Image (tube, grey):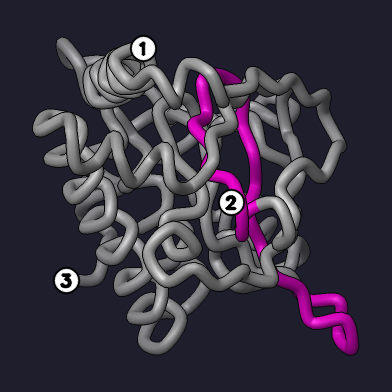
Amino acid sequence: MDTKTDKISSQQLILRGVSNSSLAVQNQKTLHFTKGQDPLNSADTKNYFYFIMSGKIKIYQIDFQTSKEQTLYMLTRGDMFDVVSLLDGQPNEYISEVLEDTQIIQLPLENVKNMILEDEQFRQYFYSYIAGQLKSMENLAVSLSFYDVYQRVLQLFARFTEVKEGKTNLKVINNLKHEDIASMVGSVRKVVNRSLQKLKNDGIIDISRKNIHIKNFQKLLDKLTI
């Protein structure tokens, strides 16, 4: 669910679903986190479900022997967490990090399950969201198995680029540190930096400090491996 329209509609559905449920109204908490905090641990997600209302949170795992990170999700406005724990009742050993000041609505898992049962529109959005997450994980697995880092970076940029009225806008990842981009494509900063420099030399992107601008989206698509 990457488009701005999807994010806005999901917020409306979440707020309406919460307001229509007396238990949800009674039990919800609005939480605020600042950059650098680790807000969502496994004990919390075993009991609570979260709706991201603003900001940005990275969900990742790390191999402590090699210190290598793999980003699984980049949560922004309209996203939900943790769908897997909601469905199977088991905590996940994820690590979270707030990348931008973030506001979250916290609800007990049972309240969210009731929202899914009672609100048809929210239920449809929830199932669509699950499908999107599954597709994202499938794409990540395929990308890590079959493509080199340069192709993975191209795929990442293609996924988060919005084209509107002939203008391109790189969303969510446009101001990430290169270490975070490397974590999203299963690599390290040094290797990703080479790919970014190649993209810049090819006239596909511009880089200003941490900000990345898609300069030629069609050329980016042409270089993607089909």
Q: Earlier in the sequence, mark 3 or mark 2?
A: 2
**Residue labelled with disc 3:** 226
| Distance (Cα) linking label 1 and label 2 | 45 Å
206, 33: nearer the viewer: 33
Q: Earlier in the sequence, mark 1 or mark 2?
A: 1
Identify the residue at horizontal 47%, vertical 16% (top origin): 25
Q: Which mark is residue 19?
A: 1
In terms of secondary structure, where does tag 2 sit? helix
Whole-percent x, y for residue 39 in the image: 77, 41
Identify the residue at horizontal 42%, vertical 38% (top origin): 111
Closer to viewer: mark 3 or mark 2: 3
Task: State the extent of the magenta-drawn residues as a range.
Answer: 45-68
Marks 1/2 in contact by CB < 8 Å: the verdict is no
Magenta highlight on residue 114: no
**Residue labelled with disc 2:** 196
Q: Amino acid at mark 1?
A: Ser
Mark 3 crowdedness (10 Å alpha carbons): few <14, some 14-19, many ≥20? few
Q: Amino acid at mark 3?
A: Ile
In terms of secondary structure, where does tag 1 sit? helix
Marks 3/1 in contact by CB < 8 Å: the verdict is no
Q: Specify the quadrant that holds the C terminus.
A: bottom left
Q: Earlier in the sequence, mark 3 or mark 1?
A: 1
Closer to viewer: mark 3 or mark 1: 1
In terms of secondary structure, where does tag 3 sit? loop
